[in-house]
Amino acid sequence: MSQFNVFITRQLPADLNPLQQIATVEVWPERQPPPYDLLLEKTKSIDGLLCLLTDRVDRHLIDTGTSLKVISQLAVGYDNIDIAAATARTIPVGHTPDVLTNATADFAWALLMAAARRVVEGDRLTRAGQWQTWEPDVLLGATITGATLGIVGLGRIGQAVARRAQGFEMQILYTGHRNLELERSLRVQFVPFEQLLHESDFVTIHAPLTAETHHLFGDRAFAQMKRSAILVNTARGAIVDPDALHRALTQGDIAAAALDVTEPEPIPTASPLLTLENLIVTPHIGSASRQTREKMAQMAIANLMAGLGGDRLPHCVNPEVYQ
Ligand code: DGY
């Protein structure tokens, strides 16, 4: 008889055998997330929950899980989970930092370069049979080398983005928590948010979604950016107000944007944003390299198993539960 019951909200690229040695494991088999009411029902009788950023793990759900010992999130971000509610119940919450830093930074750069050099528009033009000859002025984009990059949030991923920017001889500005050590080692300059908006040719978002960052990029922010600026968001969709972005891109307040995350997700196919040529949208795949997703799954299972066994989670969001 297994000691524990576990619910995993999606199929994972991972070996579940070690987990199955200690727990009865149910894996949600569908491509879409389990509906909230179903997750609520499951939570009533489980010891461990392995969830994704598409699952709403709110106070009501957490309080329903009277035998819940651990919540393990397959992501570094955890804004879908009510951490305060989990902490109040002394339930540790795990996440998957570090392993996705480089993959996500690479992808932010892929979007930045694609938007700057109009890669997606070029592909569309070619497929539409409009590549007629070499032309001096077709699809002119922005110069990356030597430009100014503004990084909103210099956490692990922001730092990895800054390291890559050095190869492009960029001037690097950042906002968020000031870190003098990083300023020396990464040659980055801390500036107020408004100054970053005024001076950056490219702005890339690497901050968590919080009450402070929700719709940080709205009409006011776009009005302060260079008209030639390009915005990249690989963090969380709701940091950018989609209506304000639409206005900024159509009015020419900024030149272009590239989003891997949107509000809501998925972006509705009828969204007016999707009619714009100067916008690239990808389906939240920043961390989606095969090796990275496998490591994330292993890490999420390690957190889950530690929590079931009453051990400290290797990567815990709310370590205060151990005090
Ligand atoms: C995360 O980990 O928070 C990303 O958004 C998905 O990898």
Image (spheres, rainbow, N blue to C red):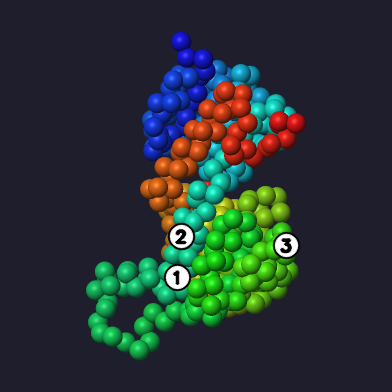
In percent of width and height, residue 279 lies at 46, 66
Q: CA distance from mark 2 to mark 1?
A: 10 Å
Q: Is residue 273 above or below residue 88?
A: below
Q: Which mark is residue 107?
A: 2
Q: In this view of the protein, which residue sits in the foreground, 313 or 84?
A: 313
The amino acid type found where label 3 is placed reads Arg
Question: Would you name the residue on which mark 3 appears?
Answer: 178
In percent of width and height, residue 316 lies at 62, 38
Q: Is residue 9 left or right of residue 211?
A: left
Q: Is residue 30 left or right of residue 43?
A: left
Mark 3 closeness class: few <14, some 14–19, many ≥20 residues within 10 Å: some
Secondary structure beneath dot 2 equals helix
Q: Quadrant of residue 159?
A: bottom right
In the rendered view of the protein, which quadrant contains the C terminus? top right
Q: Are marks 1 and 3 in contact (CB under 8 Å)?
A: no
The amino acid type found where label 1 is placed reads Met
Q: Earlier in the sequence, mark 1 or mark 3?
A: 1
Q: Is mark 3 within 8 Å of ligand 1?
A: no
Q: Are marks 2 and 1 in contact (CB under 8 Å)?
A: no
Please identify the residue farthest to the top as the structure is shown.
1
Q: Is residue 213 above or below residue 114?
A: above
In percent of width and height, residue 219 lies at 65, 66
The amino acid type found where label 2 is placed reads Phe
Q: Foreground mark, 2 or 3?
A: 3
Secondary structure beneath dot 1 equals helix
Q: Is residue 52 above or below residue 157?
A: above
Q: CA distance from mark 2 to mark 3?
A: 25 Å
Q: Which mark is residue 113?
A: 1
Mark 2 closeness class: few <14, some 14–19, many ≥20 residues within 10 Å: many
